[in-house]
Amino acid sequence: MRFKIIIYWLTILPILVFGQHYVSYSKNAQEVSAKLSDGYLVLRPMNENAVRIQFIKDIKPEENQFVFVNENSFSDFKFEENASSLKLKTKKYAILFNKKTAQLTFLDGNGKVILSEVVNSRKLTESTVSSQPCYITEQSFVNDKDEQLLGLGQFQDGHYNLKNISRKLIQVNSQIALPFLYSSKGYGILWNQFGLTWYNPADESVPLEKEAVTDGAEKEVTGTSGTVKVSQQQALHTGKILIKKDGEYTFMLDLGNMDNRHFLTIDGKPVIDQSNLWLPPAVSTKVFLTKGEHHFQVICKATNTPSLQYKLAEDIITFRSPNSKSLDYILFVGNNADEVISSYREVTGKVPMLPKWAFGYWQCRERYTSAQHLVKTIEEFRNRNLPVDVIVQDWQYWGKYGWGVPKFDEQNYPEPEKFIERLHQLHSKFSVSVWENLDKKSEVAKDYVGLYIPDSPWIDVFNPKTQKTHWNALNKNLFQNGVDSWWMDATEPENDALVGKNTFLGIGEFYRLTYPFFVSKAVYEGQRATDPDKRAVILTRSAFPGQQRFGTINWSGDIGWDWDAYRRQIVAGLNYSISGMPYWTTDIGGFFRPGSSQYSDPKYHDILMRWFQWGVFCPIFRMHGYQTETEPWKYGEKIESNMRDLMNLRYKLLPYIYSQSWEISKNNSTIMRPMVMDFQGDKKAIEQSYQYMFGKSILVAPVIKPNIENWNVYLPKGYFWYDFYTNQKNKGGKAILADTSHNKIPFFIKSGSIIPVGEVMQYASEKSNQELSIKIYAGNDGNFMLYEDEGDNYNYENGKYTLISFKWNDKAKELQIDKRVGTYAGQNNHRIFNLEIIGINKEVVTQKVSYEGNQLNIKF
């Protein structure tokens, strides 16, 4: 008995002395609240798949909860208490609160543990920011050794699986911080903080000393991998530490500000090495180190002061926010990623339909210099039979009106409504760049007096009055002239500019990540109120949870052009997409490019074409480049011809893509899908970081190395996979070599898929798709919902659309085309479907059928 008592006190004493202990609980129809020794822990179900956890102390919790569209609690839950625990339960999850340790454990609907808090890791540590009290908020969770973690937005660090990776979540050019994490175990965590957050913070420091600052001449640093040069205005920092045990260590290099180089060596071997004109301040990596002394070298701008932190990698997830008012996170549970993301969007907002033209090709460059330049470019696209739907005007069209002023300088853009109308006559939409730091001395800025963030060039878009004023300026000077969509640039705002500022909502540190949300809100709500018949389209450089409900598309910022930069974009896009944001794109060919040599250099053409091939299978298909003529014909006849073929492929797939966009808006789906979304039971599949599903039927494997004729592709088990080009049938569960010659990107169709394929078009609305090819890939049962509507208004919200369901019975070899559901103006009542059944014998079986809207059954 004495031994048991000793063990008990050894267990409970640290909790009583150092941690939280349970006092009592209260319950109502919306929540369960546990009173602890140092605060209140509140469990509030939000829907049957989601629960919000808050730990509250003396400071009043954040009142500005703009992320959620519905804060009403979900009251259909059960509650139990016994001597050792409290239990809250819905059909999809249960939460256990341990009275002894104050630990929360989360279980799925089957009672299986999916996540547990680390005991005593729930922390609210008193602090201040700008003399205002706040907390350093922290929470850690135990995770499995083989668990895959994805999300957190868009980063340039190249990491796919984020397990034991450290990240600094701030908004800067090319980095989008979305504090949402998805696990392959079937849960998601939305860390509900608006300021800086550290993910898996590393707290042990490597002392660094500045060794050299160059004064013009390059300095050479020699390591085991060879010689590295420290260029002008850079500095070399060195340090050493003693590692106490063998193991994998996480290192976080934080340069303090944007830089043009991420470079870290350990014992002479580069472990981080990336260069670009500018890069985010922080980057991390994992390295296995043996016990003993290790030496470090960091190269960065001489004006930056780097810090290098490290920690032993553990099976633990930690979130830490230094400027916070309470601990607050939402746990989402589901059988798969789609269920988790669906629950996330039910809480934070559903995604509106983009117009059909947004899924065509976007022509963009830095920059078009006049109205005539824009019009002649689209005329040349039409003359060359190169499909295009959008042309984009980048910055500095404002000329004499002052920096960032949303108004066309008439010297180069006379009578804006006329040149935009000419673009419309050429069946091109027009998008224009807008910034939120317009010249305070300008005539347009007079309406913004008192609406700037104090001591800042950025408007205070947190203020509802600013939002209205900003939209009024855009409407008067741009939208009323016929502008079709918005390119909201630098919406971070640029260079993490809220630090040390006071905003309408409060101290900038509290709202450091949220500026892009309010920019998007201002434009979306402003346009819908002004013209409810024109779908809002907002291309923007930054994002925050909930922003998906404002018709936004994000892109990966001002990136480089080499193979390393290209590979990083694929990983960045996949993690961004699984963070709940469906529409994303990248600068095809890179933003910063190799200068005039790009037009004739075969080595650059190799990467440009591989990037362009991948662009066909991005949610949005868009070219861009700094100080570059990006039009296809600038690269010679061969490149132009190859690009034309790929554009034609994109447009032929528009019926499939547009139907996927309906699945996004109606059923909370995702179009750019990491492999874990569809094959979570196939360990080999989910390890593939450079291939993904485009919709639920098409597997895409971009080529990410130069001079490749054949590419290794893993085909997930449980299906047959058909080469789109040859219809060759491959059994899943193995890797194959795919032919990548002759302008081919490997992509395969999953058995049981039904793919509608349209005609080649020069713009998305050129043809009605009255006649469609319907490709059915045999081997599994399958279905597809063909969605069609008017293409560019919000009538679909009132049921003005049609759905045609295709169902394939593989055993019976029978296709059922259901009765058409719904109506809209201009719909195709009389259709021709060219059916192609692939895989039931060595030949493709074809049949042409007329469809008048009634059910058809076709047996093969």
Image (spheres, grey):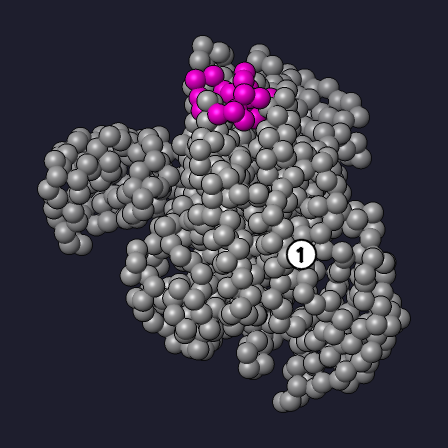
Whether 320 is among the magenta residues is: no
Q: Amino acid at mark 1?
A: Lys
> Magenta stretch?
442-463
Q: Which residue is mark 1?
A: 356
Give the left or right position of residue 104, taking residue 164 as reference: right
Q: Which of the 4 quarters of the picture holds residue 649?
A: bottom right
Q: Residues within 10 Å of mark 1 (few under 14, many from 20)?
A: many
Q: Residue at x 68, y 84 (%)?
A: 840
- Does residue 390 sit above or below 540 in this rendering? below
- Does residue 173 sit above or below 783 in this rendering? above
Q: Nearer the viewer, residue 474 or 13?
A: 474
Whether 458 is among the magenta residues is: yes
x and y, in percent, of residue 711 in the image? 42, 72
Q: Nearer the viewer, residue 201 or 793?
A: 793
Q: Main secondary structure of the magenta part?
A: loop
x and y, in percent, of residue 495 in the image? 40, 32
